[in-house]
Amino acid sequence: MPKQYSLFMALSLCFLLSIASPLLLAKEIEIDSIDAKIITTLDQNTLSMEGNVVIKTEQLEFWSDKAIYDKSKKSIKLEGSIRVLSKNLDISAEQMEANLLDRTFYISETTFDFMNMSFGKADSIRVFANEKIELLNTSVNSCSIEDPLWQLNSASLTFLESGRNAVMKGINLRIKEIPILYIPYVRTAVGEDKFSGFLSPTLKQGRDGIDISIPYFFSLASNYDLTVSPRFIEERGIGIATEFRYLTENSMGGFTASNIFKDRKFTDETNYQGNRWMAQWSHRSQIGSNIFLDFNAEGVSDNFYFENLNEDILGTKQKNYLTTRMKVKWIGELLKLEAEIREYKDLSPFTSEQYETKPKVSLSFRHRIKGITFTLLSDYTKFAFERSYNPFSKEKYIKRQVIEPSLSFSHNFDSSSFSIAIGSEDLRYDLNPSSFKRSSNWLETEYKVFFESKSNQVFKSLNPTLKFISYDEKSNSSQSIDSRLMSLNYNNLFLRNWYSGPDRFLNQDRVIVGIEHNQIDLKRDINLNLLFGKAFFLEDKYLLRRNNIGSSPLVLEFKNKLQGDFFSNGMIEIDSNFDKVYSSYLGVMFERGKNKRIELRSVYKRRNPYINQMPWLDKELPISQMELLTQWSVSDRFIVFGKLQKDNELNESKDFSFGLQYSNCCMKIGLMKRKWKDQDYYRWYKNQEEAFKALESGINPELVRDNIYIFFELKDIGRIGKDISEVISSTLLE
């Protein structure tokens, strides 16, 4: 459930609850000690105190120049230089009255400091016996009490029902003396409680200008709710978004929809005249004790909705296809059954169209008797390719049946382990009008040794592994629906099949040798993990690559941490003669503190292992990319940052950005320059055949974007523009 914080609540809640929680939780606040220079007994129930008065309770301390304490009424009245202190809070006031028996408080002309992070003042704070808290003429900021850059003000703020919801009136934001925002009335919930009211508005500045959204939350019941968000985008127009969520004893889900009325910018670019909308539905339920249902569906008005109108401030996130999926699972103690239907809708004319599954039914059975495990895997899938445009002459319908029974045994010794497994695989394809079968038997056995050395602060281990894999089938399937050659890292090297999916498999007999070394040195803050492996084929040739070679590449993988600041990890798949690299990745990072980081990442693949028949210009080129990220504080207030993504094969930059940020106690401001390449869909979005012909003729459907961004943030209020943490992060190579 979303947090129901308004703008004012986000700042004021932390210190208000620090005041209220010790007063509201205890039945009666007990005084631990009273100290003052002069203590006078006025009558048998009343004490008068003057000079450095200190009254201590379990939760709070009260300091003042003068105080009167009535024992019978359990009341305190303080005057002159009053301070109320707790672990995180410091309140100053001119006058205070408190009844410790029923926990009612009145504080006037007060200023406060919460953990030296939030500052403010109020004409009065009242804590009532009915658990209501009321503040009048309150202002809060994260700068200082004396001269704040900005202030968030409220004419009145009232917490009701033990602080579970609040009513705020006359809210306004001022930078110095300039009014920026005014909200006359807000009623909202606090924390995780659900209560109808406004949520925090969002204000963004991107390539489409100012983007404002003001959500309103409807608490319809304890188990379902609705959020409605009117939205204004400066260069596009007005829209609205809704999110409905539900939760029952056996199910949960949500429905999200949004609509932009008459997108002006999109109409100018494409002549599209209708409303632009998006809808998504996600549902998960449990039927009985063993049956589970998952359903996900999404739809859009046009192919560019996610590119133009997603939540990314720069608007560069793209989605190539939509997915509709329904899966039903039955899970028993030994048996698991799954049935799935999956459909796709392409959004990009340059996507490699995928087969839909209508349906896919799989079975998994596993039973262990006296150390021997019997496993049965079975899969039936009907693939469909029903697009009107089919440039690669894909079969419209394919039925695939897979059944794989196996027996396995494993045993752990004191310093080693042993396992052996045998099985067979039967694969059948039904195409219109032909069909064919493939059968194979296999065996694999593995022996692993554990050598360990321990001292006071050092742990070392060396684990050699020997594995043998044998097949009796010597041909591959002519079909390749969903099989892909996986990256040959250390773990994948020991797999029986180096392809995902059953269509293709590495059917050569081989012996695999691997060594894993670990070292942890707590004294020197070193953590090293080193893995080395190689497969030796019993036949003359290794047929996986284009050029036949006698054995598999060497695989070397490592992870390393040195002295807490330097981290590295990487993998290389190299020819046995050390003259040809097939794939590799490398990551190196230096990090010191929060704002000093330099990171270099690179990836290389001699052949693109993915199935993509679209005639891209660089289709036959290796994948060779590099990314450099940096963020460095040059002083307490200035940070410089940058990012570079480069295609080494084409020798060109794909994304380059740099900038600087200034920050102080209450604000951040920064400038960023960004130049990057993006796919240009607009010329071909109506005709996929034309898109295919354009690629064949050598057209590269890219456009260069070059923008300058300014980001401005009032701390604890929100930002306009791009956040630095998003600018310098990337998932491209992850």
Image: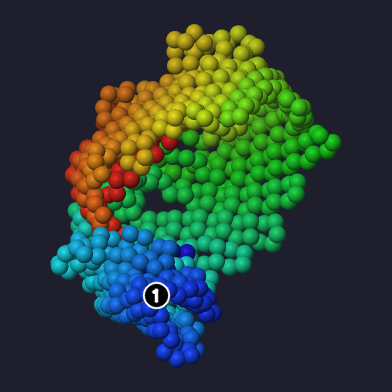
* Closer to us: 710 or 451: 451
Q: Could you tell me the amino acid type at mark 1?
A: Ala
x and y percentages locating residue 157 in the rendered image: 33, 77
Give 229 or 383, whichever is nearer the viewer: 229
- Residue furthest toward the left? 178
Indicate the quadrant where residue 542 lies: top right
Q: Quadrant of the C terminus?
A: top left
Q: Quadrant of residue 466?
A: top right
Is 369 situated left or right of 340 in this image?
A: right
Residue at the spot of label 1: 36
Indicate left or right for 726 with 472 as reference: left
Residue closest to the far bottom: 43
In the rendered image of this protein, does residue 7 appear above or below residue 71?
A: above
Q: Residue at x 28, y 68 (%)?
A: 120
Q: How many marks do you count on the picture?
A: 1
Q: Nearer the viewer, residue 666 or 718?
A: 666
Q: Is residue 487 above or below residue 343?
A: above
Q: Name which residue lies at 24% across and 41% down.
A: 635
668 vs 629, left or right, is left
- Judged from this view, the residue extending furthest toward the right is 370
Identify which residue, 502 or 522, lies in the foreground: 522
Residue 675 in the image: state x and y as whole percent: 22, 38
**Residue occupying image coordinates x 38% and y 46%:** 319
Does residue 235 appear in the picture of this structure?
yes
Residue 177, given in percent of the width and then of the height, sits at: 15, 67
Whether residue 236 is visible here, answered yes or no, is no
Quick one: SS at disc 1? Answer: loop
Instruction: Name the side, left or right, on which 253 lies relative to 265.
Output: right
| x and y, in percent, of residue 390 in the image | 42, 37
Label 1 crowding class (10 Å Cα cut-off): few <14, some 14-19, many 20+?
Answer: some
Residue beneath the point at 65% across and 52% down: 329
